[in-house]
Amino acid sequence: MTTGRFTVRESKPADLVLSNPEAEKKVLGFLLHENSALDLVADRLDERDFADPLHARIFAVMAREIGDRRRVNPVLLAPMFKDDDDFIDAGGRVFLEALAQDVMFEVYDPAYAERVRDLAVQRRLVDSLRNVIEGASTPGADLQLIVADADTALTAAIERRDPGVLYDAGDMVDEVIAGFDRVVTGVKSGVVSGIDLLIGAIRPGWLGYIAGRPGMGKTAALISYLRGCAAQGHHVLLASLEMDWSTVSLRLLSDYCYAIGQPILFDRLLQNELQPHQQRQIRDIRNEVAKLPLTIVDKKVHTISQLRRAIRRQKRRLEVHDKKLSLVAVDYIQLLKPDRSRDDEFQDVTQVSRALAEMAGDEDVAILCLSQLSRAVEQRQDKRPMMSDLRSSGQLEQDADFIVMLYAEEYYLKKAQPASDSEQFGKWEADMARYKDVLEFICVKHRHGAEGVIHGRFFRPYQAVR
């Protein structure tokens, strides 16, 4: 049913039980008696939260009128409902006057609005679960979509974004002054200095990308960075869409052994060709590695909803112990799919990027993703990556708080080795010595700071980045 500019839903079966008409009347009465009470109510309620359709329509009109700075009382409001049969049956203007008189000697109590709100959430939960049950009862139903729909529906039913707060210029300065002694929260690695120096502390709500062509050390850089963050006490969650947990574990061990000055070749770990003393070394460091607050989600995460559920599950696990999830990493974004894939990589990555940006804010975590680059890099003489090389979607550039690209000249020099008796061999040898283990961190976007280039090291045999 429509009243003025507002469309209000009709009542449903759940409304008959999960409703409190008297609490709804109290809210309406307070608004009629004191219009300024809308400032206290509007952050908690809107017309959809009222179970009684008439109450919902009355609230919608009052909110509109008060919002437009027009006075609302029974005399002024009644003519607006002259064609509303439910309003006439309820008593018309007398009904409104009774609402106002009922609270005349009361002080506004937020408990009434909270009760109306809580019951509205319950009704939405019932409706959402009923729809999910109906979908799950259909033969041949897509279970992945049903689970995604259930997660989305339940989240929408329960959560409500905080209302916007208005700050004047003076208020903003006061906020800055009040924060002089505030500890800045954020994640730094302390291991991969190139990212730390370029980006600084990665804050909750940020979305960042580490991008590069194959062979540039993206995964090694991510593992080294995450190990450093965990060693600093930050709780980290890695969603590995490409590698299984055992391969990630071997990379983590290889990086850790290098860090403590007892390096083991990654290939030896991968092929399980360890010498007895190296096996003892792994056993000796087991407890130290186990202390790292780093959790790996194996390749079972394929969609945005699955990632969101994994994040929330980990947050709940940590909150029990009064701890906070600080950083979520994804390896890599092109393997993460929207809940309803269009089989179009460009469109899918666009949806995923937008969803990740929203998720970082909603879940109050920093999200760091690996990203592939397009093959166009290989066609250029200078193969240092540029923003336009981001594969699949320009949406990544728009959504990201920062983007760091990796470039290793040594990788391309090895592929271009000339014959040892050629004139170019001497120069090639000199270049190889110059660029040995050198890894360039190229910040092509930083929403909160400056762009630039930092040189680090990629010790490829040990899969360790510094």
Image: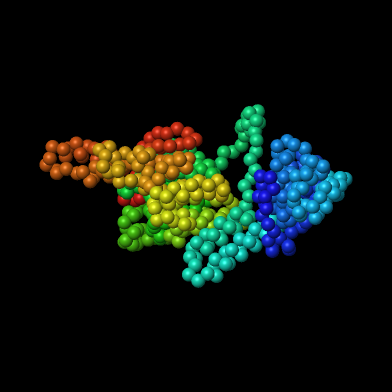
Relative to the observer, which residue lies in front, 170 or 7? 7
| Residue drawn at point x = 54 percent, y = 66 percent | 135
**Number of callouts in the render?**
0
Decide if residue 342 is on the left or right side of residue 77: left
Where residue 405 appears, as percent x and y from the top left, is 38, 41
- In the displayed orientation, state which residue is furthest to the front: 83
| Residue drawn at point x = 49 percent, y = 67 percent | 141
Where residue 229 appears, as percent x and y from the top left, is 48, 47
Where residue 198 appears, as percent x and y from the top left, is 43, 37
Quadrant for residue 426, please give it.
Answer: top left
Relative to the observer, which residue lies in front, 51 or 408? 51
- In the displayed orientation, state which residue is furthest to the right: 105
Residue 77 appears in view: yes
- In the displayed orientation, state which residue is furthest to the bottom: 139
| Residue drawn at point x = 76 percent, y = 54 percent | 85
**What colouring method underlies this structural image?**
rainbow
Where residue 132 appears, as percent x and y from the top left, is 57, 64
Decide if residue 392 is on the left or right side of residue 128: left
Quadrant for residue 182, please give it.
Answer: top right
Task: Work out whether 180 lies above or below 41.
Answer: above
Check the picture and name the quadrant holding the C terminus: top left
Decide if residue 273 is on the left or right side of residue 285: left
Relative to the observer, which residue lies in front, 289 or 161? 161
Relative to the observer, which residue lies in front, 409 or 281? 409
| Residue drawn at point x = 41 percent, y = 42 percent | 394
Residue 188 appears in view: no
Task: Work out whether 301 lies above or below 224.
Answer: below
